[in-house]
Image: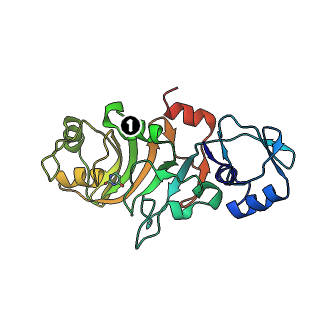
Amino acid sequence: MERLDKVLANLGVGSRKEVKVMVKNGLVKVDGRPARDSGMQIDPEKAAIEVGGEILSYRKYIYLMMNKPGGVVSATFDNYDETVIDLLEDEHRIFEPFPVGRLDKDTVGLLIITNDGDLNHRLISPKWHVDKVYYAEIDKPVEDEDVRKFKEGVVLDDGYKCMSAKLEILAADENGSQVYVTIQEGKFHQVKRMFKSVGKEVVYLKRISFGPLKLDEQLPEGEYRELRKEEVEALQGK
Ligand code: URA
């Protein structure tokens, strides 16, 4: 059960204060009867809610794809830095979503933001082997030897041996390299530390896909959009 005003606010009908006024003015009906109190408890999955004669269907979850810009942190709150949640419109923030996994402050690209805890768990658990693909620029020439080492599983600075990772060289010369890296884990600074372990530095990092989901090329950095139904279902493995 949830408060009527919270449900309506989640639906983007208005702030709790505005909803209160609507209820007072008799604009809101629950199961065909005018709601008397904006704090009344309803079952949002079952109650038929009408606002100004229009029937609303409730949704509990939101699923967003953001092209994360540099300089913001993947958290719901931070004392110093702007967070990815700060970039959302009120109509989405009201659902209290959180980022699925983390991208470093300077990493850009695909970030899923949702309030669906089950999906979050499925996507970040190493058990499910979800592929995450990154485009990276490296300070030195990447070689076939590095491809082999990544495939075998490199050992990080703390002694952790990574799972096998796919490294594809797009271009490489004395000035640096452009590569794709596919990993299934999400350790802290993982891609950067993997390159460190082979004596190289990541100078630019962008996530371009997460499991079946590809970064929408139409999305400029700092922008986001809701996922389509098929995209959510693909992430859920349906
Ligand atoms: N690996 C990193 O080093 N940083 C990220 O943000 C993501 C993966």
Q: Position of residue 168 (x, y in %)?
A: 33, 41
Q: Is residue 51 left or right of residue 116?
A: right
Q: Position of residue 47 (x, y in %)?
A: 71, 37
Q: Quadrant of the N terminus?
A: top right
Residue type at mark 1 is Asp
> Element at badge 1?
loop
Q: Can you identify the residue that label 1 sits on?
A: 131
Q: Residue at x 84, y 44 (%)?
A: 54
Q: Is residue 236 left or right of residue 55?
A: left
Q: Position of residue 25 (x, y in %)?
A: 85, 58
Location of residue 189 by image quarter: bottom left
Q: Residue at x 56, y 48 (%)?
A: 64
Is 2 placed above or below 148 here? Answer: below
Taking the view exactly as shown, the residue that stands out farthest to the left is: 159
Q: Is residue 199 left or right of residue 40?
A: left
Is 108 placed above or below 228 here? Answer: below
